Image (spheres, rainbow, N blue to C red):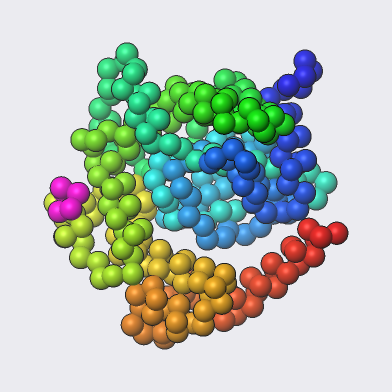
Amino acid sequence: MSIHSTPLDVLIQAIGARVRVPGDSPMPIPGLCFYRREQPATPVVCMVEPSIVLVAQGEKRLWVGGEGYPYDTSRFLVTSLDIPANSEVLTASPEKPCLGLTFKLDLRILAELIAQSEAPPRRERAVLKGVGIGTVTTGMLASFARLVELLDEPEAIPVLAPLVQREIHYRLLQSDQAGRLRQICSVDGQGYRIARAIDWLKLNYHGPLRVDELAARVQMSAATFHHHFRQLTAMSPLQYQKWLRLNEARRLMLNEHQDVSSAAFKVGYESPSQFSREYSRLFGVPPKRDMAALRGKAAVTDLRGSD
């Protein structure tokens, strides 16, 4: 970082230089991804992993269960669980694109830092949602700027990146979103149990779901499990499973060129017509039309990238 550049300048320059066309670009540092958007866009379906999302330039909004979470250079987005959501670009243009980064959280590092903290564990009176908006601090921006600058020193990444990543987790635990993160790392808490249930669902989404059995698996009553699951994810367990199935089917059709029926059966649907109805409800268009649009969009992006 030069004497005159701010941490935000460092992020804008680094992201703009490395992501020349709209899209998401994973970086050589594990868990770090840059993104670029050049125009406002209506909400698109996405799964947000436990992560922090920073905007270096522009403005975005995440929709979860009908509630919007806007964030920009002064506010960061944090998710403590795998959250099905819709991501919207509010402010962007080709001249001044929306630039930012996502940084995947390591819950083990968070748990270690919480354990090392001298502060007594705070009991949250209510289960917090799995997504929140926090205030960006100078220390947080500076640590991200240091992490991004390591991209210019590839040989230093294995040695120094883990140290800076640990600092970023520490900064988050000093932020106004600390309670949300502590909730997921507390092994005797409801948030931790819901996180375990989500891990199980991600591995077993294609099979039948018996909510009472899943609740018992994470040592909760069915009623408590259902209440806290919806509180954290803005979905019921069955809706969450359906979301996982439909998105995996979309991936199979797009990336592995499977036909509609094959993808439907593979993710656990018994009826292709029911699959098509639910797919249209989630993505706004039937599967075949969606695939045609996505492939057309990918072809345009490929052409732009090869210019």
The quadrant of the rendering that contains the N terminus is top right
Count of all numbered marks drawn on residues in the image: 0
Residue 179 x/y as whole percent: 36, 30
The quadrant of the rendering that contains the C terminus is bottom right
239 falls in the magenta region: no
Identify the residue at horizontal 77%, vertical 40% (top origin). Answer: 17
- Residue located farthest toward the front when viewing the structure as drawn: 155
Q: Is residue 163 left or right of residue 23?
A: left
Up-down: is 139 above or below 288? above
Q: Which residues are magenta?
A: 216-220
Residue 2 x/y as whole percent: 77, 19
Residue 76 x/y as whole percent: 55, 35
Identify the residue at horizontal 29%, vertical 41% (top origin). Answer: 191
Q: Is residue 91 visible?
A: no
Up-down: is 178 above or below 81? above
Question: What secondary structure predominates along the stretch shown in magenta?
Answer: loop
Q: Is residue 206 left or right of residue 278?
A: left
Residue 269 x/y as whole percent: 35, 78
Identify the residue at horizontal 57%, vertical 81% (top origin). Answer: 288
Identify the residue at horizontal 39%, vertical 73% (top origin). Answer: 267
Q: 230 and 302: which one is in front?
A: 302
Q: 252 and 178: which one is in front?
A: 252
Up-down: is 254 above or below 123? below
Q: Is residue 271 visible?
A: yes
Quarter occupied by residue 34: top right
Quarter occupied by residue 108: top left
